Image (spheres, helix red, strand yellow):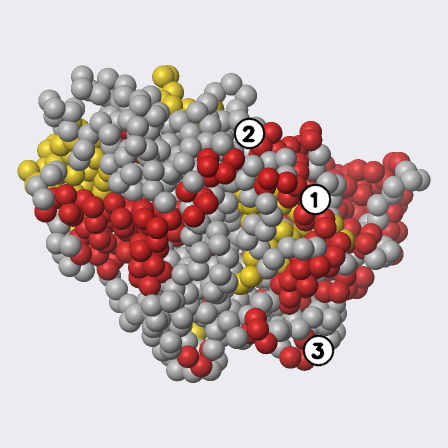
Amino acid sequence: MQIIESPKMYDAIIVGSGAGGGMATKILADAGLKVALVEAGSFFDPKDEATRTQLKFPWQSPRRGASSTRAFGDFDMSWGDWKVDGEPYTNKGDTNFFWWRARMLGGRTNHWGRISLRFGPDDFKHKDIDGLGENWPIGYDDIKPYYDRLDKLVGVFGSKEGLPNDPDGFFLPPPKPRLHELYYIKGARKAGVRVIPSRLSILTKRINNERGVCFYCSQCGRSCSMYADFSAGSCLVFPAMKGGQVDLYTDSMVRTVTTDKEGRATGVSYINKEDRKEYQLKGKVVVLGASACSTARILLNSKSSQHPNGLGNSSDVVGRYLHDSTGSSRGAFVPALMNRKTYNEDGVGGMHVYSPWWLDNKKLDFPRGYHLEIWGGLGMPSYGFGFNVTEMNKYIGGDIGGYGTKLREDVKRFYGATMGIAGRGEAIARYENRCEIDPNVVDQYGIPVLRFDYKWSDYERNQAKHMQQTFEEIFDAMGAEVMGETPGADKDYGLAAPGQIIHEVGTTRMGDNPKTSVTNSWSQLHDADNVFIVDAGPFVSQADKNCTWTIMALSMRTSEHIIEELKKMNL
Amino acid sequence: MVGTLAGASLGTAVSCKTEGEGPAVEQSAVSADEEKLYGRIPSELERDKRIMDSVYLNEHELATIAVLCDIILPATDTAGSAVEAKVPEFVEFIVKDIPSHQLPMRGGLMWLDIESNKRFNMVFQDCKNDQQIAIIEDIAYPDPDNKKPEMGPGIKFFNLMRNLTLTGYYTTEMGFKDLGYVGNSPNFWDGVPPEVLAEHDVDYEEEWLAKCVDQTKREVTAEWDDDGNLLT
């Protein structure tokens, strides 16, 4: 098979069009660079009627939105989930990592939770506090100007609270709490837990004329046809393409970064999924934003005589220090919410209030914090609605089971009377937890796949145990009945399997020492100065904050550094 | 041509508009064809077609399911029955879509006919209503003290039938109306209605509300001072 080379010379080739790649595309194209954006998935525009799921009713799906076709249900806007046809991954021994991939323009930003939290000053230097993991080579002051510009460029609602490690930004106003959220505020405060308005990248107010304003359908997970939530395609890539500087290659699966005799990058080699042929693009700079694990895979597959252990991997650190957020959750029945009057309580896509970490780990048996996310309300029924509803009667001394009029009454009595809390915490990044190339398995494009090897430690298990105690204290204080058994040590206290929270980061961590890190503090490979990483790979640690806002702020910072370096003829 | 060179379209055609103040939000009429679309990609359309073209439950099984559906959710003065909401059609599809339902459904239906034959020398579907109800009364409630051990499989089956009937019913237009779900339409959320709030032991605090969105200014472009205070 002949490799087909493009004669065009790009200033930058960007791999991946999600949060990191989308931001790099916007910054580099707006600065006048000629950019190739290479995306492994298909073209997607939330406005496209053919693929839109927003505002669809459950009866428009024959399975009523069940998860048998898409893992998070028929209406979730992710093409690809824990499994992608023809693109497997494996786990070593008895480990069990979950890896979500969205094969589409904008990647996972089309369905993400829009939770947009800045890392705080402590989050960049946590080793100084507890001696664990590693400090970032940069601090909050280095990234703050980019967070500020990001808030204004992309839009995020929230409130100024003055909390030292949960920095404020340039916020749009948050929506008013829903009814169950008012009960949560009251109960959580009684239990000593702070509650503040949530911080989500959803436009409660106009920020420009290109994007619409939220109309409160609560379906950000379906990607907004008004562009009122942040998705990388609609908010970054499309505006960037208006200037004519971007060539977009979709259904193009990057296999390797190509390098020259000096070991510097010359471009990328990719498989066109439609004709299954291999192509090469040439560029002065390669910017990898394929996702922490996909970028590690590309680097490890980019072996050459100059980079025998894979590109950027002289340290053998590529793929290591992989870590996901921790997660544990619980549901409860709130008697005060029985027999509710119904009204449109959809609100924005996600919670209107949340609890940032409120304790001091010095007094606890686990080193890092977690925040609390909540769900509940008069949501739209879909597959699973009504399952085992009569069992709720056990909380009020009613009869379990039945049919007919009694059953209809049960459904209405308990509709909107349940809620839940989920803890999302920081795990310690460990050398042993990694993804590597499986020596025996290739995907349908002949590209060697990733093998994961990831185990939780007692730090994460003890944290999950504490989450469960917190849930029960808050529910008790609300007068709510906790549902189900408390998950014990045998179940890791309900701790989700690694990868399941879909915040995997750290596989190409940054640092000043090339022996213990993959990139420098500009997310530039130590081993090849014209290769940069703009996904969550360079994260040294990920705080108990969702990673997207920091991916984008870092991508903006790295992209502007690339522009400066090109101007200085350093690249 | 290498790869796919696609252009961004930034048209304004969407299915709803939110211009102006207040809840004057319109949705364009949805044609019958559009009603059937739910944003599938080609591989998903193929999967749906494959499932729809396949057959699992037979006519007798589906007829029995219809009888059960209307025992579980009969019509009321204000709401139609499960059969009127086409729940049997949903059950027919979902057991093919989620194969783990197949054996419990088929075996449970057979168990029901065997039980009915034992008691009334007829399959369930052909029994009189009071005979059917006599069996249903024995399987519609849990039996924690194991007083009727021989009813165990029936109780398990009826629970599945009840779950699928409820889900199939309350995910229809008829079900939404019966439940009182009024969302999934563009609106401006401005808090819990005062008359609802009045019935509850919680309230909005002035300090909290002061942080929240003023819906009359939603279309006014955001501007901030250097300290992040919203000016507009």
Give yes or no for contact between labels 3 and 1 (Cβ–Cβ under 8 Å). no
Name the residue that disc number 1 marks.
A469
Q: Position of residue B79 (x, y in %)?
A: 69, 70
Q: Label 3 neighbourhood size at 10 Å, few (<14), some (14-19), many (20+)?
A: few
Say which quarter of the image contains residue B193. bottom right
Compared across the picture, whether A343 is left or right of A291 comes to right
| The C terminus of chain B, quarter of image | bottom left
- Residue at 72 percent across and 65 percent down: it is A337
- Residue at 57 percent across and 28 percent down: it is A457
> Nearest the camera: A194 or B88?
A194
Q: Chain of mark 2?
A: A
Q: Secondary structure at mark 2?
A: loop
Amino acid type at circle 2 is Trp
- Residue at 8 percent across and 41 percent down: it is A569
Q: Label 1 neighbourhood size at 10 Å, few (<14), some (14-19), many (20+)?
A: few
Name the residue that disc number 2 marks.
A456
Q: Secondary structure at mark 3?
A: loop
- Residue at 59 percent across and 41 percent down: it is A361
Viewer-nearest of labels 3 and 2? Answer: 2
Q: Chain of mark 1?
A: A
Q: Earlier in the sequence, mark 2 or mark 1?
A: 2
Q: Position of residue B81 (x, y in %)?
A: 70, 64
Q: Position of residue B61 (x, y in %)?
A: 68, 45
Q: Secondary structure at mark 1?
A: helix
Work out whether residue A412 can be spotted.
no
